[in-house]
Image (spheres, helix red, strand yellow):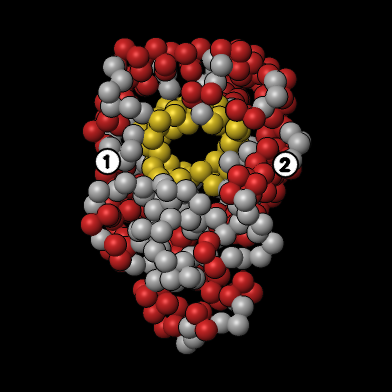
Amino acid sequence: MKLSKLLLFLVVLSTISCVNKDEKTTFKFGVWTTADAKKADAEYTKEFKKYKAGGIDEVLINTGTDPKLLKRLVPLATKEGLKVHAWIMAMNRPGDSIALQHPDWYMVSKEGKSCFDNRPYVDYYQWLCPTRKESREHVLGLVEELAKVEGIESVHLDYIRFPDIFLPISLLPKYNLVQDEELPQFDFCYCDECIKAFEKIHHKNPKKSHNTSIDMEWKNFRLNAIKSVVNDAYKIAHKYNKNLTAAVFPYPEMADHMVRQRWDKWNIDEVYPMIYHSFYNEEIDWVGYATQQGVSDLEEKKIKINTGIYIPELKSDKELREAILLAKENGAKGVSFFDGNALSDSNLKTIAATKAILK
């Protein structure tokens, strides 16, 4: 009798071990996509079926922060076997009808110009201040409305940072720019609330700094302002039994340098580093390098990394396959593709075939 119980226990233990092993080795495939409320349900069903047949497991959907549209799409995607993440443009809120009623909510450059009416680089750069109580609560309120939607996996933060103090190198010619140093027109946020909050902690005004680019307290203040928004969003998401995820710059040190974003210090469940190698004039092997950097920085944490791959700049399906394998080999738990519209039938066949060899 005792022997039978022992054998039963060993069988159960073996089964649990196998399940845990499968869970640990599961490599997921996602895609970012933007929704259109005018698009019919039948069209979405067709799109979701196409993704699923191509090996995609999850869709990160930008609904323009519209929970009503999200509620409509979740069951359609779920029916086709896809998990749904609610993708939100967080600190950059172009065309936000509520925020636009409050010009004082917007980030201000070192030159003293506000994103409300003087936007860096492109017209859709309308960044809200992460320090000012009203603007950060507005963003967190939007996060909460999405988190309430039944059936989503996570609220997925994008533009959860400051405007680019340094652009990716391949984009500089487009704007006829040389950025060998921090330029005041791209350095944010110097609004009254940020200055006041910083002075309260450090008893000095960054506007009077000899060189703000080497003022570590001022830089850290802004890193912490974003971190604070993320950590509050994390509490909100978990309040509704959802995860918090984010699209971030390639690896923490690089994100810190380029956009005041230090994502290895956040309370968050998963990150999706946008390792778009062509933006930095790098070769395909950089996908593996940047993935490994992030994995190393998160070594002591439970945060998972899903490598973001930029489809339009891939030279071939062979390169697509190589990028996926490089991400997997360097510790990523999945990959996500930007974006759904860019995925060709050939790409999807390649993804499905690559996924099959990873099982």
Q: Callout 1 environment at 10 Å: few (<14), some (14 to 19), or many (20+)?
A: some
- Percent from the top left, x then y, of residue 88? 38, 42
Residue at 63% over, 54% down: 177
Residue occupied by mark 2? 281
Q: Relative to the observer, which residue lies in front, 87 or 266?
A: 87
Residue at 43% over, 13% down: 49
- Residue 148's tag is 1
Residue at 39% over, 71% down: 191
Q: Residue furthest bottom?
A: 203
Residue at 56% over, 82% down: 209
Q: Callout 2 environment at 10 Å: few (<14), some (14 to 19), or many (20+)?
A: few
Q: Relative to the observer, which residue lies in front, 102 or 153?
A: 102
From the viewer's perspective, is the residue at label 2 or at label 1 nearer? 2
Query: Can you say whether 66 is above or below 267 in the image?
Result: above
Q: Relative to the observer, which residue lies in front, 38 or 290?
A: 38
At label 2, which amino acid type do we have? Asn
- Percent from the top left, x then y, of residue 112? 43, 71
At label 1, which amino acid type do we have? Lys
